[in-house]
Structure formats: C-alpha cells, structure tokens
Image (cartoon, grey):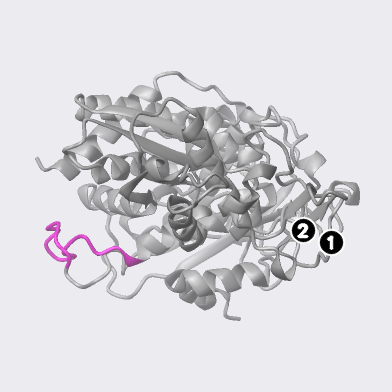
Amino acid sequence: MNRTITLWIGALSVCASLSAQTVELPVCRRALKDKRFLYFTDFSRYPRAVEKLPVAVFDSGTGGFTVLEKILSIDCFNNETGEEKPDGVPDFIHEDFQYLADQANMPYGRYGAEGKEDYLRELAVKDALFTVNNFFWKDETQKKPKGRKLPAKIIVIACNTATAYGLEPITQLLQEAGDPLRVIGVVNAGVSSTLESLPSSLNQTTVGVLATPGTISSGVYERTLLAQAKSIRPDLALQVVNQPGYGFAEAVDEEREFVDRKLTTFSNTYRGPVLGQGDEEIHPELLEAYRFDFSDAKAFIAYDEQHKPIRIQLNSADNYARFNLLNLLEKTRRSAVRRPIQAIILGCTHYPFLQTTLTQHLQELRHYTDSTGNHPYASLIADDCCFIDPAQRTAYECYRTLRDQHRLNPQQKEGRLQPFISRPSPLLPDSCKDAEGNLTYAFKYGREVGTDELTTVIVPFSPRSIRQDHLDRIARLLPLCFGKIQQAMKP
C-alpha cells in the first residue's frame, strides 16, 4: 500500500473517530420523517441508475468554484483502466455537476461568533438536502419551487466551515437513510495534503492554518492534523498555529460591509479589522510590514496632528490577505514555536483566489527589516514553506470514491454544469433586506434553528442572480468553471 493510499485511509479513520458524538438536529429528523417538510427526502425512491446522476458541490458562496476547478482539471487516473496514472484526459470529463453557492447566507464563518453554531449546522444540512432533492426555484420571485433537477450521486462539501460543522450530521443522516451516497469534506483532504508535503526527514515542524473564524473556533483542522499525524507519523512533533481570517472571505466576495468599490472615503457600516492590538485588529506599529495598498480606494487611513494613524479601513481582498498573513506570523512569533512554519493551509475556499498575493507577501515578510535592523519573520518561515490548497486532494478523493463504487458516468459526451445560488425569499418583508436586496446582518445572524420560515430560495445562475464582478473574477482565475457557467447561462 503506497503512502498516498495510507494517508487517504488515515483521513477517513480520523474523520470517523471525530464524528463519534452525535449532533442531533431537528432538520435531520424531519428530512427523513416529515413528509410536509420542504426538504423531506424519501431515499427508498432514489434513482437506481446512480452512475448517471450529477456530482454535487456546495459552498457558502462562489469560493467553492476553486474546488470545482480542480475537480474539472484533475488527471491522476487512466480513464479506461483505472490505473493511478495520468492519461492526458481529465478524470471527470464525462461527469455532470451541480454547484450550489449559498450566497444569501454567507459568510458561514460569522455564525460561530454570533453564537449560532446550530443554525450553521442546519444551513449545511439543508445545502446537502438540496443536492439530493429534485426541486429548485426558477427565479427569485417564485414563492414555491417549480423547477426540477436530478439528485446527486456524491456530495462534495467545498466549504471548510460547512465541513467543520456539517460533515458529521450530514454523514449521520445519510447513514440513517441507508447510506445511498457518500459525502466528502475538504478538511480531511487538506490535512492529508499537508502531511504529504512535509519532508520525511523532519521530526518536528510547524503548520499554519488560515481559515474563517468559524472553522478555527471549531478546532477541526488542529484536531485532525494532530490526530492524523499521531496515526501515520508518530515520530513527528507537530505544532499548529491558527489564524482566523477576519473579513477575508467576505472581502473576496465583496460583502458591502467589508469591501465596497463605490467608496471614496471611510464608511460607517464597515465591519472589517480596525486599529488595535488584538488578533483581529491592525497593529499600528506594523503598518510598514503589512504593506497595504492605499491606491484607488483600496484602503483608507487618517492621521492625527502628530501624523500617527488613528483610523484605517481596508477595502480590497488583497489587503485583507496581507493583514491575515502577517497576523499569522505575529502569532507564531509570540508563541513558543520551536520550528519555522513548513506549510500554511488555506482553510477557506475563497483564499486560493488570493494565492498570488499571499505568496508575494510571504516573500516580502521573509526579507522584511524592522526599524531596529532585525528580520523578525525570516526565522519563522521555512525555506520551502508552501501554501496548501485542499482542493486537489478533494478532487482525488471524489474520483477514487466514484471509481471504487462503480459510479462513474458511462456517457461519452462532455459533462455539463447546473450552477445554483441562494437569494433572499420574496416572502420576506423589506425590513429584512438592505438597499441592495441582500439579507441584513442583524436578520441573517438573528434567525433561529428548527423553524419552517423560508428566508432564502435557490435559483439558477443568471445575470439577475449572480453579480457580474463575481463572474469576472471566476472568468479571470477559473476558466474551466467559467466556460461551463457560460454554457449553463445561455438562453
């Protein structure tokens, strides 16, 4: 058995051990028992020709397209023989896909901070239930879902936070239903990739985790890293440094309270990091090290009469990337870390959009000289430090699972994509929405678990439902996804 397979099996074992405690959610019980429930699913009537069903991928927003791009491009197997050897043909070329961006309810990483962990779990379960059902809303004005689609044959949770809070209840729900399909989360895939990247000669090292506040507070990455390392690398002394990506995912998706391209000066509704000394604050003495870009309204700064900064507002995803990476290194510097950081896990699907900026800033910090002539970060960064995107291993595990289950699509034509996105329900009063028609912050994070209140609807991608700047970003960075989105959005 080779090391790749050993790591993969180790990840599944760790996942099973971490899921030993049952999370009982009303939505799970109702999905299997209550025929009046919108998300009720009769798995006894699931289609028998499972191999012809689509692969489902869901995320809290458009960030999960970074995972889908890897799935669409991966070539690790011979498509004819199944041998683990590239054959020049994408492994998933004949597979159909469904993608769900739960844009109306994002960012998922904020629910934990607002004490709404169970509501987050419910959202993740409903995302999964949407993929195994056959309904959708044809447009956001419909009060009831009148569209029809196929259910999925496998579910990929592309969102790290949704994996942290939802993988366990979703897996248990499917097991109780007779285990008709598998669900794969990005966390275990990211951990496997990280441990594989560590040189075998190391007996102690440090791994950084950059993820949403919700994912970090769940402890899932650190817990899984330590458990899996103990299982397959018992000789390795592993330290983990966690950095919540404050405002990072929101900035990538340009949530107006974090990034607003229309601004020309400070905004009173800003929720991003401000000046201070906390983990989620901008340290004024480190302004030169952050190297924020203040051009073209990408950030704003105000000074007092002594030219000391008294107010800062970030207004670009690149600046959020710089802020969070430096704060990760600052946390490492202040801790009792024995070895430099060997790998940094990008524990949110939105972060790979800024990998170029992160890589550049890491090199800047490696060579940064402070006012005393010291290089405070050079010793904290291993010479071959790398960023880990869990998407590649997620794609690998998805294909291997389908092949092992004999569920690959036998069609000879190229597969298609059905992209869906959530929008505020037309049943909601205007007081629950902001000027742009999105859910207000107070309403979004004030909702209660276990109600029948329909606050969002799920519609196909269209010029009305998906913002053009999101499409532009996908077109620029994820060409395979964009090509399939264009095809799906044709009249």
Q: Amino acid at mark 1?
A: Thr
Residue where numbered disc 1 is placed: 265
Viewer-proximal residue among 265 and 51? 265
> Image quadrant of residue 416?
bottom left
Q: What segment is highlighted magenta in the picture?
A: 73-86
Q: Label 1's element? A: loop
- Give the prevailing secondary structure in the magenta stretch: loop
Task: Assign a secondary structure to mark 2.
Answer: strand
Q: Which circle's residue, 2 or 1, is located before the other in the chain?
A: 1
Residue drawn 80% across and 67% down?
262
Residue placed most toward the observer, 382 or 110: 382
182 relative to 56, above or below: above
CB contact under 8 Å: marks 2 and 1: yes
Label 2 and label 1: CA atoms lie apart by: 7 Å
Query: Which one is nearer the viewer's eye here, 73 or 325?
Result: 325
Task: Tell me residue 434's x, y (percent).
Answer: 85, 53
In percent of width and height, residue 42 lies at 49, 39
Q: Quadrant of residue 338?
A: top left
Kindly identify which residue carries mark 2. 300
Quadrant of the frame with the C terminus: bottom right
Looking at the image, which residue is at 31% across and 29% down?
238
Give the residue at x 65% y 63%. Answer: 293
Q: Is residue 81 magenta?
A: yes
Q: Residue furthest bottom?
A: 491
Magenta stretch: includes residue 273: no
Picture coordinates of residue 271, whole percent (x, y): 76, 45
- Category of crowding for the residue at label 2, using alpha-carbon neighbours closer than 10 angstroms: few (below 14), some (14–19), many (at least 20): many
- The amino acid type of the residue labelled 2 equals Phe
Q: Is residue 50 visible?
A: yes
